[in-house]
Image: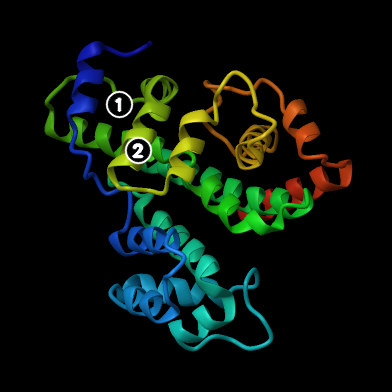
Amino acid sequence: MGFSLDLRYEICKQPIQLPVFNSVALELLQMLADPETQIGSVIETINKDPGLSIQILRMANSSAFSGRCKSETIKDSVNRLGIKQITNLAMAASQSALHSSTVPIVNDMMTSLWKHSYACAVGCRTVANCSGNSEIADQAYLAGLLHDIGKLYLLKAMEQISLNGSTEFELDNDTLLDVFSDMHVEQGFRIMNHWDIPPLYSEIESKHHADYADPNDILLSIVRLVNFSSMQYELNDFPRFIQPRNAEPEINFLNLTESDLAQLETDMRSSCA
């Protein structure tokens, strides 16, 4: 551990309510876990946040999601794309807005973190489809988007500590990377449990850097492979904590071809273009 115990203590003292989720997007995610959720309830929930509604509409009409005709309302978008896709868009839109800071070094790292998280979301959806697991493509997208939520929390916590001066430390790249390496998995799991994120995603958070892959956990294998690939494609600026050391087991579990891996690279790189 390359940072002081005092800093670790201050990070753990930070309020768990730090803004790492938009309340409306979080409500949608929790609604998604309920098979009885109705489309009308989803539309009503989205419309609680006009800013998020605009972002969802813009993303729904982007080239990645648009059909022959554009959606003019949230209702149009939900009817066209479905609850799962709209929840994905809401979570992506809200997370993008949260990846900013008035502190230059933190803002730069948040921008890089968003690039990585979004590329992983897109990549996980691609791998799910390529590997014959299209029925979990929406889950894979969210798992990729949220797998590093602990890093966002840590960035916001360290920003707060730096601004209030409760503990003296050097807010530099090395310290941030050391904190990520040591704490992002445990803090991400803690955050997800506090916010009542469906266990499917908190389990991915806790296991995506495990020593060994589980061949029976397809979703975890997808996230591990894509996270590893993000380093190969220079879409991960936090290389200090590299695990798995290679992705051969995940590639074999998922029966991916060279063509599938080429598609993964294309889609992940395109997400950041």
**Depicted 68 relative to depicted 273: above or below:** below
Image point (28%, 42%), residue name: 194
Q: What residue does disc 2 label? A: 106
Q: Are marks 1 and 2 in contact (CB under 8 Å)?
A: yes
Q: Is residue 273 visible?
A: no
Q: Position of residue 197 (x, y in %)?
A: 38, 48
Q: Earlier in the sequence, mark 1 or mark 2?
A: 2
Say whether residue 188 is left or right of residue 166: right
User: Which secondary structure lies at badge 2?
Assistant: helix
Q: Residue furthest front?
A: 36
Image point (53%, 82%), residue name: 79
**Depicted 92 relative to depicted 49: above or below:** above
Say whether residue 38 is left or right of residue 273: left
| On-image quarter of the C terminus | bottom right
Q: What residue does disc 1 label? A: 171
Q: Between residue 152 and residue 200, name the one nearer to us.
A: 200
Image point (59%, 50%), residue name: 140
* Tag shown at residue 139: none
Q: Position of residue 152 (x, y in %)?
A: 37, 40
**Depicted 196 relative to depicted 106: above or below:** below
Say whether residue 195 is left or right of residue 145: left
Q: Between residue 203 and residue 258, name the one nearer to us.
A: 203
The amino acid beneath tag 1 is Leu
